Amino acid sequence: MSCEPRPDDFESRRQHLKALSDAELSERFWALVDQIVAPLIEEARTHTTPSIERSVLLRMGFSSLEAGQLVERMQARGLLGEGAGRLVLELANAKGITLREVGSGLLAGRYWNELS
Amino acid sequence: MKLSPDKKLDLREVLEGLEHYRPRRTGWRWRRRRDDPALGPFVYREATEDLAHSVPLPAAHYFGDIDPQCDMVITTEIASGRFEDDLRRMRMAAWHGADHIMVIRTTGQSHIDGLIEGTPEGVGGIPVTRKQIRATRKALDAIEDEVGRPINLHSYVSGLAGPEMAVLFAEEGVNGAHQDPQYNVLYRDINMHRSFVDAAEAKKILADAGILQLDGAHNANATAKQAWKVTPELFVQHAVNTGYSRAAGMPAGLIALSTVPPTAPPAPKLRLDLPYAVALRELFSGYRFRAQQNTRYMESDTQEATVTHVLDTLLSRLTSADIQSTITPDEGRNIPWHYNNVAGVDAARQTLMGLDGLMDMIELRQDGPLRQQVRELKERAVLFLEGLVANGGYYAAVADGQFVDQGYFPERRGDGIARDPDGGDGAGSVVARAPGYGAPVCSHFGVNVYAGRSGKPCADYGGCTLCDPDKIQYVDELDAEDNVEQRLREPLAERAAGVLRPEVEKHGDGIVCVTLLVPERAEVAEAAALEMARHMGLANAEVISRRLLHPAEGSVFEVKGRLDITVRIDALPMKPAEALLDDADIEAWVRGRDIHLVAATVGEDEHSVGLHEILDIKHGGIERYGFHCHDLGTSVSVERLLDAAEQSRARAILISTIVTHGDVHKRHMRQLHALAQQRGLRRRLVLIAGGTQISDELARACGMDAGFGRGTTGRQVASFLVTRLRALEA
């Protein structure tokens, strides 16, 4: 659906703005922007996505191909909310092996039952 | 890798050792003011540091070949589909003053959920991959050394793989990026939750790497029919991305608004565009501005496009811009050609140097319609935001079609782009972070168990790739056929064999463009133009621009086609390069010999600049070697020149002839030669002609001893004179 058509009723709609100084108008502009942005950024703060998790694995030294497969498999197991990077790092710490060894193990089908 | 101005970019060298190549720096670079404002005969108010190598504007040779650089960074957008061809174009653009190279992505990359690797060929852009970015950055590092100014590489962090693309850019030294989740939502129909959640992470990565962010608001007036009516919404789109970027941790100095003057003539452009530009700069004071040029009303006529773009650039100077982007004048008719990138960059720098210091002399009137319209635009933008809030916030408003409606808000046409918050590409892929969620890496946004600890989040394993680039996993090629090595085989073999073809976009494309005026009514004329092009041997001839001169008298066409021939360099009739005498040798021979010369512009011709350049000591002319020059001025007859030569016992006559109507320049040269013979002077007089349409070959054919064309220096003339006079004495 789209907004219903309506004529340009700027004159009647602006009545509450016309007494504002330029600085007050600008202030109002940015206050409204902050109000609109707040729920969006809150969602970002508390959520993640496959792309974010792949970008984490890239930063941990995996290739795009490895990161893609690892995230896909974690997503299929409902594990993304834990953080792909945390899962890999904790497994490496627990087993005393490197991050890349964890990655190649997971890609070979190992360790999956040890991930929480 | 080091470039030499007389050698082509070695693509083999670019591709060699890429797996180990590291960018020399990260982050954006602005131009630096020139210490000394004086340059040639002028003092500049806004000039920045000179280039070590460049191609000056064509008229620069009147002013000592100066090449002043403007204060704004100049952008050119490059995308042929093959990055290896784009690199050569980048080098050309850099020599003409571009220091922001925007690499357009291949069609559809936004919808690929992940990174692409290798060097596959693209359509309307390149697939942005690590290898292509790395090769481009490596080539640009060498090009920036050659021109002597940092060059910013730029591409796009949008689509389904934004955070990964941002990591790639941070790792590989990309300096600028488009990042605006609204672009995904409105124009790519990518799920809005996914787009915004991804965007926060991407923005954090870009911010920490010092990468300049451009937003995507300009797309709204590129799509609207009446682009000036979406201006209230544009403030809002800029503001949503700006506010969101700040909330994600991006400093104001890295946030650039991508803004386009919405109209083009015959619209009353500046009257409509100026209030919008002023209001935007006032509301967004403290942020950067990337001024784009108008594409919305571009037709296939490159001259019309250039005039609009010059007006756009004037608007940048009347308000402000940190970056002046350029649109190639041929974008209305094809994927841009090499020389049109250069044409766009040249038009911008020519305009900006021409406007240097303008605002020291004029100001925008604040007591007229400008202020009133600025205020109205701001109020309409605030009303738009209020409507957004009343609608239930951003997602609900998009679902309701509040965006890209063509009504002048608060007017509504009901034709906005509506998107379902639960729909689009990537819908359902956003996941809530669990209480123990963690991402042990730098530049991560939001809730993270590793963020609150002392030390870096990546300390547990010795550092992430942003701290330790050696950990980056480089993937070379994934496709044995679709890669740069395969594509380069033929071009490199041809180059090695010294074979040349014309080119506009890709090596060996053979495309040429001819201009034809056909004196007939339009339909007949167009058919005739195509037939004529076929007779010229052009394959796939196609009219790419048509302009009616008169319904009955004719039309002018630009016709492109493929010239399917090759030329061998070693078979070309090349004249050996002229060896010039040293300044000291010339002077040693001339001084003490008391050599007189007579010079003038002949015929009915008042041009004198060229001749002065050749004669005058202050222009580095031949007087400085000790020649006695008798300049008789302009519009001088051949007879008078010979009279003067006899009186002063001159050894040479130099004529300048600029006017060429009815081949009058050839007639003057022939007359001079014939009359000198009649008077018995020809043997002892050296006769030289110069002018913009004169070549040595033409002048000799008309009886002269030598001819000199555009760009000739005094030293060339003096060197010839001494060589010839020596021979005569011997």
Image (spheres, coloured by chain):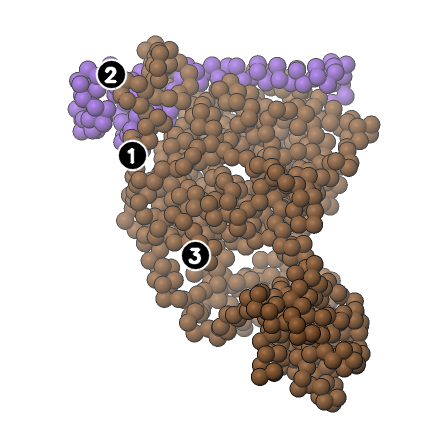
Q: Is residue B399 above or below residue B60?
A: above
Kind of residue sitting beneath label 1? Gln
Residue B718 in the image: state x and y as whole percent. 62, 70
Chain at tag 3 = B
Can you give x and y, in whole percent of width and height, for residue B427 in the image?
41, 25
- Label 2 CA crowd tier, 10 Å (few <14, some 14–19, many 20+): some
Q: Which amino acid does label 3 sit on?
A: Lys
- The residue that appears at 23% across and 27% down in the rendered structure is A100
Q: How crowded is mark 3: few (under 14 residues within 10 Å), some or many (20 or more)?
A: few
Q: Which chain carries label 2?
A: A
* Front residue (pair B99, B590): B590
Q: For marks 2 and 3, give the CA distance.
A: 52 Å
Eye-nearest disc, 3 or 1: 3
Q: The purple chain is which one?
A: A
Tell me the residue that label 2 is attached to.
A90
On what subunit does the disc labeled 1 rest? B
Q: Earlier in the sequence, mark 3 or mark 1?
A: 3
Residue B95, numbered label: none
Residue B538: image location, x then y, percent: 51, 67
Q: Do labels 3 and 1 share a chain?
A: yes
Camera-side residue of B531 and B56: B56
State the image quarter where residue B701 is shown. bottom right
Q: How crowded is mark 1: few (under 14 residues within 10 Å), some or many (20 or more)?
A: some
The picture quadrant where one finds residue B463 is top left
Amino acid bearing label 2: Glu
Residue that badge 3 annotates: B8
The chain coloured brown is B
Give me the residue at 56% from left, 30% from top.
B256
